[in-house]
Amino acid sequence: TQLLEQSPQFLSIQEGENLTVYCNSSSVFSSLQWYRQEPGEGPVLLVTVVTGGEVKKLKRLTFQFGDARKDSSLHITAAQPGDTGLYLCAGEREYGNKLVFGAGTILRVKS
Amino acid sequence: GAVVSQHPSWVICKSGTSVKIECRSLDFQATTMFWYRQFPKQSLMLMATSNEGSKATYEQGVEKDKFLINHASLTLSTLTVTSAHPEDSSFYICSASYLNYGYTFGSGTRLTVV
């Protein structure tokens, strides 16, 4: 059982559609991070959320951290083909200096 | 911003040989470095955590004699895959952190064992 449940695992949508990716856990995290990864490259940090209920926006991407700091979501508005990639959530436990990754969401945006 | 350099970016080796992968923090001193393994279209799986000057802490199921980790300085950690076999073929990624300033990832190493 994964500590961080990420869904959906695969998402194929048309350009212009909206989508939401979820990360859920029964554990509390001191911070939660979202990454995007291209094939053959390392993950690139998109955002870090640390406060329960926090909402951060990065252009068409909106990130939310749950009030209890156990879950998070990534919402993309008007998806574009350039958004295609693997999206990963990762949480840092309150008493540990390491990241726990969700299973990842492979997003494909078709033009 | 913080940069982590990982080398080589890809390597092909024969079965039974050993391969060393380097991870360097270029503009900061990494108190902790992490090694991950990633299979195609899957997430990152943490293999081990290393602190400078001390033995690495391996995750459950990771063979420490198979995957040797050395963290001799605050800017360099190495992962050596010993006696590599085709099943060790994978994408290996390192990351480095400094205190509570977040994690920076390397660009990964594609290992193919033939």
Image (cartoon, rainbow, N blue to C red):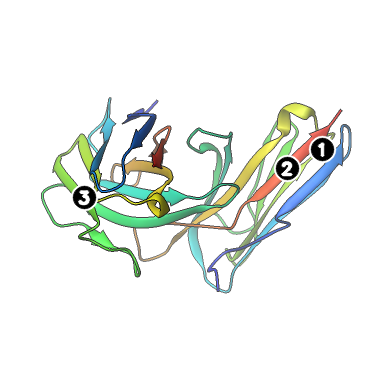
Q: Which residue is mark 1?
A: A77
Mark 3 crowd level (few <14, some 14–19, many ≥20, 10 Å Cα): many
> What residue sits 75% from the left and 45% below the top?
A75
The reply to whether discs 3 and 2 touch (Cβ–Cβ < 8 Å) is: no
Say if A67 sits above or below B71 in the image: below
On screen, B78 above or below A103?
above
Q: Nearer the viewer, residue A14 or A3?
A: A14
Q: Amino acid at mark 3?
A: Ile
- Which residue is denoted by mark 3 in the rendering? B69
Identify the chain of the residue marked 1, using the numbered disc in the image: A
**C-alpha separation, residue under disc 3 versus residue under disc 1:** 42 Å
* Tags 1 and 2 on a common chain: yes
Distance of label 1 from label 2 (alpha carbons): 13 Å
For the N terminus of chain B, which image quadrant?
Answer: top left
Q: Position of residue B40 (x, y in %)?
A: 56, 47
Classify the position of the C terminus of chain B by image quarter: top left
- Residue at 24 percent across and 44 percent down: it is B17
Q: Does residue A28 appear in the picture of this structure?
A: yes
Residue mark closest to the camera, 1 vs 2: 2
Q: Is residue B80 left or right of residue A49?
A: left
Where is residue A53, by image quadrant?
Answer: bottom right
- Circle 2 sits on which residue? A107
